[in-house]
Image (cartoon, coloured by chain):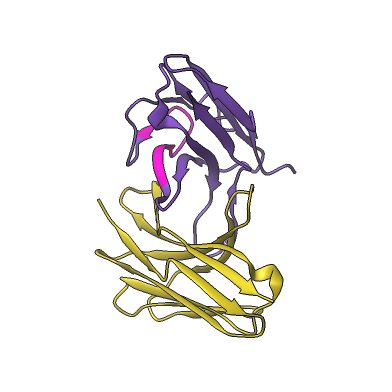
């Protein structure tokens, strides 16, 4: 099946620093999604990307859909304590009409050092 | 509008016991999904349902059965629980498209099989 390699696995940064993480795939996707998960909660969608080359921002978050459709990155600028959590990328391949399926990366755990 | 709800939140089973995890969404979404989340593995798709009355296997379907009772509800059943099924289970209701910006996950069910 499709696999997503997400890196880094974990990050320890100081408040105010910028963060960058990325995902690469062995096959192409039609959609890239970035989620954040906090302890005891389900993943929450941060950014959705629908076109190759697309660059989308959501506040301090910026994500890009790679031109090859096999990769995506997420940047967080000027990190704050509430950014702590696990960030997941997910790719969607449309293999049957109306039959969307997501493949998730293994996650990047972000810890902010006071 | 409650989004996606899951019951129970926590469950402890003995090996060989059976149980059903319930999921419901009130957003009139066609597609529903069951994932399991294990440390270092990200989210893996167990089963999904593109529409009422249809279900398909995901990446890790063995040991599970599902039922799409109606458009709102999608249940996951463990007929004979095994320790390897200890995990956190997430139900998701997804609408993906160029004009969509929302993907909903439930809060999760934490299952321990002894």
Q: Which residue: 54% across, 39% down? A: B91
Residue A15 rendering spot, x and y as whole percentages: 66, 81
From the viewer's side, name the closer residue of A93 and A107.
A107
Chain coloured purple = B
What's drawn in magenta, residue-wise?
A: B44-56
Residue B66 rendering spot, x and y as whole percentages: 44, 26
Q: Height in image: A14 above or below B44?
A: below
Residue A57 rendering spot, x and y as whole percentages: 58, 79
How many callouts does the rendering have? 0
From the viewer's side, name the closer residue of B11 and B34.
B11
Q: Height in image: A5 above or below B4?
A: below
Residue A31 rendering spot, x and y as whole percentages: 41, 64
Give the drawing colour for chain A.
yellow
Q: Which residue: 64% across, 47% down? A: A40
Is residue A97 visible in this depiction of the protein? Answer: yes
Q: Is B46 contained in the magenta span?
A: yes
Q: Which residue: 42% across, 38% down? A: B48
Q: Which quarter shows the C terminus of chain A?
A: bottom right
């Amino acid at each position: 099946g499709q696999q997503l390699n997400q890196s880094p696995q974990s990050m320890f940064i100081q408040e105010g620093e910028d963060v960058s993480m990325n995902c690469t795939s062995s096959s192409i996707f039609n959609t890239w999604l970035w989620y954040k998960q906090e302890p005891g909660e389900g993943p929450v969608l941060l950014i959705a990307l629908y076109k190759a080359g697309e660059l989308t921002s959501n506040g301090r978050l910026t994500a890009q859909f790679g031109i090859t459709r096999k990769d995506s990155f997420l940047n967080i600028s000027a990190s704050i304590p509430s950014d702590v959590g696990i960030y997941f990328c997910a790719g969607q391949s449309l293999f049957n009409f109306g039959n969307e399926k997501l493949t998730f990366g293994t996650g990047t755990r972000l810890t902010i050092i006071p | 509008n409650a989004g996606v709800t899951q019951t129970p939140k926590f469950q402890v089973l003995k090996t060989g016991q059976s149980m059903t995890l319930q999921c419901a969404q009130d957003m009139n979404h066609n597609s529903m999904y069951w994932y399991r989340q294990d440390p270092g593995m990200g989210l893996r798709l167990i089963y999904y349902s593109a529409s009422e009355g249809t279900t398909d296997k995901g990446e890790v379907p063995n040991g599970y059965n599902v039922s799409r009772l109606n458009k709102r509800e999608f249940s996951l059943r463990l007929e004979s629980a095994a320790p390897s099924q200890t995990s956190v289970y997430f139900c998701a209701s997804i609408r993906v498209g160029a004009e969509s910006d929302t993907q909903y996950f439930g809060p999760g069910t934490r299952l321990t099989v002894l």
